[in-house]
């Protein structure tokens, strides 16, 4: 009865569509969970992998959702990035991991590494949304998450309204490694929130590829065609 009373005062609504949540639903209703646009695992026409062809060598690359402007996925991302919903980021990571368990190339990786935020930006936002998403994936796949080896040494402005070249220029040489021996000859999964042009991932890979024998895969919450 207390829970029902609290629900009247503080209604629980789906982040994606705004409809009321049932008791067994968490953050996202079942309809949105089932029907939000996902990229199929093991697709032969993977657009995430295609944008990196000729740029960086990856074992594989994949995104959980397809970003659509003013769509339900955008609302999830907005809640995570601007409304402090860390719980949602972790939950999406766990859901993604359930799909990734059938992906042999991913589930046997050695480490999960989130794309880092600069300390100043992390202080402003309160947390790194990519790191929270990575924690969910790490939990679901039982792969350790390392958020200290890859660092962002420069504060950069938002990529949102930049052109493809401006995005690349904005993150050129801004990442560095705190150490390399732990990653030598390891397969790591680099995790970001949204992949659009791939400029941020490419910049991270330039730093990571200084490690002897490293293999890199890439995962994100969403892929947004540029």
Image (tube, rainbow, N blue to C red):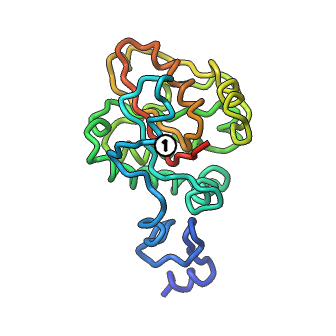
Residue in front for this viewpoint, 22 or 189: 189
Q: Which residue is mark 1?
A: 220
Residue in front for this viewpoint, 8 or 113: 113
Q: Quadrant of residue 216?
A: top left
Other residues around mark 1 within 10 Å, as few (<14) / some (14–19) / many (≥20): many
Above or below, 6 relative to 206: below
Q: Quadrant of the C terminus?
A: top right
- Identify the residue at horizontal 46%, vertical 45% (top origin): 63
Report the number of discs.
Answer: 1
Above or below, 20 relative to 43: below
Above or below, 215 relative to 61: above
> Measured from the top left, where is residue 151 in percent x and y?
56, 24
> Measured from the top left, where is residue 22 in percent x and y?
46, 78
Above or below, 153 relative to 220: above
> Measured from the top left, where is residue 73 in percent x and y?
56, 58
Is 101 on the left-hand or right-hand side of 7? left
User: Which structural element holds mark 1?
Assistant: strand
Kindly give the residue lying farthest to the bottom in the view shown: 1
> Measured from the top left, where is residue 207 in percent x and y?
52, 18
- Identify the residue at horizontal 52%, vertical 57% (top origin): 88
Is 119 on the left-hand or right-hand side of 59? right
Q: Quadrant of residue 12?
A: bottom right
- Identify the residue at horizontal 51%, vertical 85% (top origin): 4
């Amino acid at each position: 009865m207390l829970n029902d009373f609290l629900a009247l005062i503080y209604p629980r609504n789906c982040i994606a569509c705004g409809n009321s949540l049932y008791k067994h639903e968490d953050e996202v209703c079942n309809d949105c969970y089932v029907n939000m646009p996902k990229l199929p695992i093991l697709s032969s026409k993977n657009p995430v992998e295609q944008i990196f062809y000729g740029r960086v060598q990856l074992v594989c690359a994949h995104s959980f959702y397809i970003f659509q402007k003013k769509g339900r996925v955008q609302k999830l991302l907005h809640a995570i990035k601007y409304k402090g919903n860390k719980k949602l980021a972790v939950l999406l990571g766990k859901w993604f991991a359930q799909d990734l368990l059938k992906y042999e190339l991913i589930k046997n990786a050695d480490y999960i590494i989130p794309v880092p935020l600069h300390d100043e930006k992390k202080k402003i936002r309160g947390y790194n949304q990519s790191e929270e998403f990575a924690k969910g994936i790490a939990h679901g796949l039982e792969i350790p998450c390392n958020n200290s080896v890859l660092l962002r040494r420069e504060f950069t402005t938002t990529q949102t309204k930049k052109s493809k070249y401006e995005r690349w220029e904005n993150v050129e040489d801004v990442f560095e490694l705190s150490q390399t021996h732990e990653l030598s000859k390891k397969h790591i999964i680099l995790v970001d929130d949204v992949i659009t042009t791939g400029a941020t991932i490419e910049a991270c890979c330039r730093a990571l590829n200084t490690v002897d024998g490293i293999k890199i895969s890439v995962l994100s919450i969403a892929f947004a065609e540029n």
